[in-house]
Image: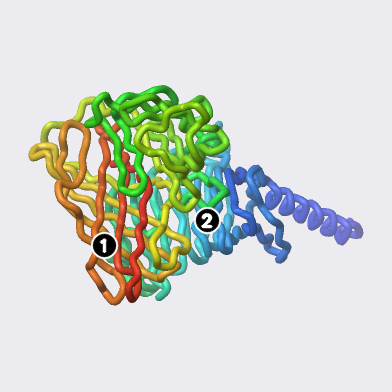
C-alpha cells in the first residue's frame, strides 16, 4: 500500500516548491519612484533594475546604491529609502477582510529610511516589525525614521505615534518627537535629543524627484491648487516677497500642482510650464523652483534676470493658516525642501538640508536651526537665530549666526523668512540662506525653500 509513497512525496515537494515560488512572486506593492541604478536582488542572487511602477516582491532586497527609492505597499504604507541603503522585505501579507492575516516583517541591512505605516500597522500591530542590526522596531500606527551611523550604531526617531525599540538588552517606548540610539545588539536603547539626518532631498538636478510620500502624480491627497494672496514666500539671492509687500503678492498653482504665475506686488509674471519644477505638493503645501527668464511681453517687476539651474527662483506656498494659537509653543520639523542652490567661490557638490522651528505664540517670538551638508567642501554647517512672529509671518530681526565653517569658522550669516499655514497653523513654509567660510579665502552661499509640519 506504500509503493507510491516516493511519487507522493515528490508531488508534495513540487507543490510546496510552487507554493513557495508563488508566495515569493506575490507583489506586496509597487515602486513610487526610483533613481537610475536602484536594484532589487532575489534570494538566489538575481538582480533586476527597478523604476516607477515596478512590483515589490517578498524576499527581495532593495539596494539603492547612490540613489533613492520610495516604496508603496498594498496596505497603503510607504517607505522612503536613502542613498547607500539595503532594505529587504522578509515577509508580507495583507487581507483587507481578515486582519489576522496581516503582517509585515522587514529588515534594514544598512543605510536609512523613513516609514509611514499603513493598515497592517493599525489592524495588527504585533504583525509589523522592522529589524535592524542592533534592535527591532514595533509600531503602534506611526511615522518614524531610522538611520545607521558609520560606527554601526542606529538612531531611531518617531515623528508621530509611538514605536517600541527592543533588543536582548532592553527596550524603550519612543513617542512622537523623541529619539533613541542603540549602539549594539548587546546595549539597551538610550533616549537622545538627536534626530536622524535624513534630508528629504529632491534628487539630482533634472530628475525632479518627490521629497515625501504625497507628491504630484503620486499624491494620495488632492494637490494644492489655486490662487493665494499673501501666504507665501519666494526668493533667490536673499530676495523675499510676502504679505508685507503692498499690494500683496499673488501666487497661482495650476492643476498639475506646479507654479503657474507669481507677482511681487505688481503685474503677475506668467511662467513657462517647461521651466516650472515641482519639488513637492501634498495638498497643504506646494514648493518648487523656476528656471529661465520672463515670459515674452510680460513684466518681470523687480527681478529682471534669468534664473539658471545653479540659482533658481525658489518658491513655497501653503493653505492660509486658520485658528492660529494665541498662547503656548509649537515645534516644527522640515519634511520637504527644494533642491538647494549653491554658489560662491567655494566648491559645490551634492547639498542636503534639514531644519527645525520653534514658535512661541504668546510672546510672538521663535527660533530656527537649519543644518546643511555640502559634499563639495565636506562641511556640515548650521545656521541658527531668533525669529519675530507677526500675525502668521515670521523672520529674522537681525541676521542669524552660522557654525561649522572651514576650520571651525563661525564667520558668515544665516536667515529664515516664512509663514504659518494650514488648520491650526499645522504647517509652515520658509526661504532660508546660509553664507559661510568654506576654505582659505573662500565663501559659499546655500539657499532654498523648506516646508515644515508639527
Question: Residue visible at 69% across and 52% down?
Answer: 24
> Which residue, given by chain and number where applicable, does mark 1 sit on?
191
Q: Is residue 173 visible?
A: no
Secondary structure type for disc 1: strand
Q: Position of residue 278 (x, y in %)?
A: 49, 39
Question: Residue visible at 21% across and 32% down?
Answer: 392
Q: Viewer-proximal residue, 181 or 199?
A: 199
Q: How busy is the neighbourhood of tag 2: few (under 14 within 10 Å), some, or many (20 plus)?
A: many
Q: Is residue 244 left or right of residue 111?
A: left
Q: Viewer-proximal residue, 331 or 140?
A: 331
> Which residue, given by chain and number where applicable, does mark 2 sit on?
106
Q: Is residue 137 left or right of residue 98?
A: left
Q: Position of residue 422 (x, y in %)?
A: 30, 30
Q: Is residue 112 left or right of residue 448?
A: right
Secondary structure type for disc 2: strand
Establish if 439 lies above or below 93.
below
Amino acid at each position: 500500500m506504500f509503493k507510491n509513497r516516493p511519487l507522493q512525496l515528490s508531488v508534495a515537494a513540487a507543490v510546496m516548491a510552487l507554493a513557495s515560488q508563488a508566495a515569493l512572486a506575490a507583489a506586496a506593492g509597487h515602486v513610487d519612484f526610483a533613481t537610475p541604478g536602484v536594484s532589487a536582488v532575489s534570494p538566489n542572487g538575481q538582480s533586476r533594475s527597478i523604476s516607477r511602477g515596478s512590483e515589490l516582491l517578498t524576499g527581495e532586497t532593495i539596494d539603492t546604491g547612490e540613489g533613492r527609492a520610495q516604496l508603496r505597499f498594498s496596505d497603503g504604507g510607504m517607505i522612503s529609502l536613502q542613498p547607500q541603503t539595503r532594505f529587504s522585505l522578509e515577509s508580507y501579507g495583507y487581507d483587507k477582510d481578515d486582519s489576522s492575516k496581516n503582517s509585515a516583517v522587514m529588515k534594514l541591512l544598512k543605510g536609512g529610511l523613513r516609514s509611514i505605516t499603513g493598515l497592517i500597522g493599525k489592524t495588527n500591530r504585533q504583525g509589523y516589525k522592522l529589524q535592524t542590526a542592533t534592535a527591532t522596531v514595533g509600531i503602534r500606527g506611526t511615522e518614524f525614521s531610522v538611520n545607521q551611523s558609520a560606527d554601526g550604531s542606529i538612531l531611531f526617531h518617531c515623528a508621530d505615534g509611538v514605536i517600541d525599540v527592543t533588543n536582548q538588552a532592553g527596550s524603550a517606548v519612543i513617542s512622537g518627537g523623541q529619539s533613541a540610539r542603540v549602539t549594539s545588539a548587546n546595549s539597551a536603547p538610550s533616549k537622545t535629543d538627536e534626530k536622524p539626518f535624513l534630508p528629504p532631498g529632491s534628487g539630482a538636478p533634472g530628475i525632479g524627484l518627490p521629497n515625501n510620500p504625497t507628491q504630484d502624480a503620486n499624491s494620495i491627497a488632492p494637490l494644492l491648487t489655486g490662487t493665494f494672496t499673501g501666504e507665501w514666500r519666494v526668493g533667490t539671492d536673499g530676495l523675499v516677497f510676502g504679505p508685507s509687500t503692498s499690494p500683496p503678492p499673488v501666487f497661482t498653482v495650476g492643476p498639475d500642482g506646479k507654479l503657474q504665475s507669481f507677482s511681487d506686488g505688481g503685474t503677475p509674471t506668467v511662467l513657462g510650464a517647461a521651466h516650472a519644477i515641482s519639488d513637492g505638493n501634498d495638498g497643504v503645501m506646494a514648493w518648487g523652483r523656476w528656471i529661465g527668464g520672463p515670459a515674452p511681453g510680460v513684466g518681470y517687476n523687480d527681478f529682471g534676470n534669468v534664473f539658471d539651474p545653479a540659482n533658481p527662483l525658489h518658491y513655497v506656498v501653503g493653505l492660509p493658516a486658520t485658528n492660529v494659537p494665541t498662547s503656548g509653543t509649537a515645534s516644527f520639523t522640515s519634511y520637504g525642501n527644494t533642491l538647494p542652490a549653491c554658489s560662491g567661490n567655494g566648491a559645490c557638490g551634492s547639498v542636503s538640508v534639514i531644519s527645525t522651528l520653534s514658535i512661541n505664540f504668546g510672546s510672538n517670538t521663535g527660533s530656527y536651526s537649519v543644518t546643511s551638508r555640502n559634499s563639495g567642501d565636506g562641511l556640515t554647517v548650521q545656521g541658527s537665530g531668533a525669529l519675530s512672529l507677526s500675525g502668521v509671518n515670521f523672520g529674522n530681526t537681525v541676521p542669524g549666526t552660522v557654525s561649522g565653517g572651514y576650520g571651525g569658522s563661525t564667520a558668515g550669516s544665516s536667515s529664515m523668512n516664512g509663514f504659518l499655514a494650514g488648520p491650526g497653523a499645522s504647517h509652515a513654509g520658509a526661504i532660508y540662506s546660509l553664507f559661510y567660510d568654506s576654505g582659505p579665502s573662500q565663501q559659499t552661499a546655500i539657499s532654498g525653500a523648506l516646508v515644515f509640519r508639527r
